[in-house]
């Protein structure tokens, strides 16, 4: 019998996780099945327990349940603790639940391995101060950038994150206006603005000629942030498809102990 895994969220219909994990399973010859589960907004924990009791081995967790997943985990990895959010659950034999967060690792791997852009010594701007940004801060600081600047519409939220992570590296925080006159080697959009077809108010001049513009979101067309970057003369425009696949590969590794090859599925999804 195959081992069972699933992604759980609401909505979940458009999730690409089943395609990605079934491709990983095929490629690494793992006898496993991976499905998508829609949980009611007030029914996350019940849905997880049902899946666990029916023999499920692990789950990916997506919006809006990453905080709920954090809350029901009986053990947490350091990176999940730092992110205060969980996107990967691994069920123990004795009904315990390991909670991990592979989003930040997926981001770093996409930037450094797939794009070939090193972070060490670079100036990095991280836009946003919600869950997506919080999960990226520690993994980014561990790569030793020269500077990590956090910019957010609500300045106070960025300041809280700056305080929380200041012992891990050179980190600043402010409004988008506060970064006027500065430019960054890597600019990462971790806001949810693209979901509404919007763009945070960004001053012009934040990119240099060699900047990487990275949006954690993706879509059929360039996101509003990547369009803005292109108008500002940036050539290196990357959307969140690579991060999506790399966070999945990291989850797969946690469950199966094997690191799948990712390039092929990234190319398929980009088409
Ligand atoms: P997630 O968990 O996906 O990060 P979140 O916690 O709701 O989602 O955070 C969303 C982030 O996107 C926040 O940083 C939010 O800014 P505020 O903290 O000021 O709310 C940011 N965001 C969403 N829409 C935005 C917009 N139109 N312009 C600028 N920032 C936006």
Image: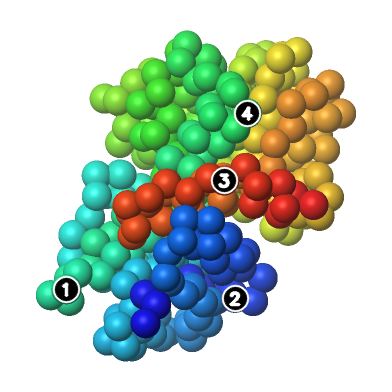
Q: Is residue 17 visible?
A: no
- Mark 4 to mark 3: distance in Å? 13 Å
Tell me the element at label 1: loop
**Label for residue 93?**
1
Outermost residue on the front side: it is 29
Tell me the element at label 4: loop
Q: Upstream in the sequence, badge 1 or badge 4?
A: 1
Residue 53, how many percent across, how many down?
27, 86
- Mark 2 to mark 4: distance in Å? 30 Å
**Label for residue 271?**
none
Tell me the element at label 2: loop
Q: Mark 3 points at which residue?
A: 262
Outermost residue on the left side: it is 94
Residue 26, how many percent across, how many down?
53, 62
Residue at the spot x=57%, y=51% of the render?
Answer: 244
- Is the CB atom of the residue marked by disc 1 within 8 angstroms of ligand 1's nearest atom? no
Q: Upstream in the sequence, badge 4 or badge 3?
A: 4
- Mark 1 to mark 4: distance in Å? 39 Å
Residue at the spot x=12%, y=75% of the render?
Answer: 94
1 and 157: which is toward the camera:
1
- Mark 3 to mark 1: distance in Å? 29 Å
Is the N terminus in the top left, top right, bottom left or bottom right quadrant? bottom left
Number of numbered callouts drawn:
4
Q: Name the residue under label 2.
A: 11
Frontmost of labels 2 and 3 is 3
């Amino acid at each position: 019998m195959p081992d069972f895994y699933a992604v759980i969220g609401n909505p979940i219909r458009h999730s690409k996780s089943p395609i990605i994990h079934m491709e990983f399973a095929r490629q690494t010859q793992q006898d496993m099945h991976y499905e998508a589960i829609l949980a009611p907004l007030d029914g996350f924990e019940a849905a997880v327990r049902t899946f666990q009791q029916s023999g499920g081995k692990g789950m990916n967790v997506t919006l809006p349940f990453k905080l709920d997943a954090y809350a029901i985990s009986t053990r947490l990895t350091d990176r999940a603790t730092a992110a205060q959010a969980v996107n990967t659950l691994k069920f123990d034999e004795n009904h315990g639940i390991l909670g991990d967060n592979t989003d930040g690792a997926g981001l770093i791997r996409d930037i450094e391995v797939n794009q070939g852009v090193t972070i060490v010594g670079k100036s990095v701007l991280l836009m946003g101060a919600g869950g997506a940004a919080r999960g990226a801060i520690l993994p980014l600081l561990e790569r030793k950038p020269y500077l990590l600047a956090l910019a957010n519409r609500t300045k106070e939220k960025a300041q809280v994150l700056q305080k929380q992570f200041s012992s891990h590296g050179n980190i600043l925080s402010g409004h988008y206006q506060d970064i006027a006159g500065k430019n960054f080697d890597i600019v990462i959009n971790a806001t949810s603005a693209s979901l509404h077809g919007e763009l945070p108010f960004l001053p012009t001049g934040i990119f240099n000629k060699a900047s990487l513009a990275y949006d954690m979101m993706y879509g059929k067309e360039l996101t509003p942030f990547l369009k803005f970057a292109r108008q500002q003369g940036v050539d290196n425009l990357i959307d969140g498809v690579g991060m999506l696949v790399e966070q999945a590969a990291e989850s797969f590794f946690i469950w199966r102990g094997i690191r799948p090859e990712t390039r092929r599925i990234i190319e398929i999804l980009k088409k």
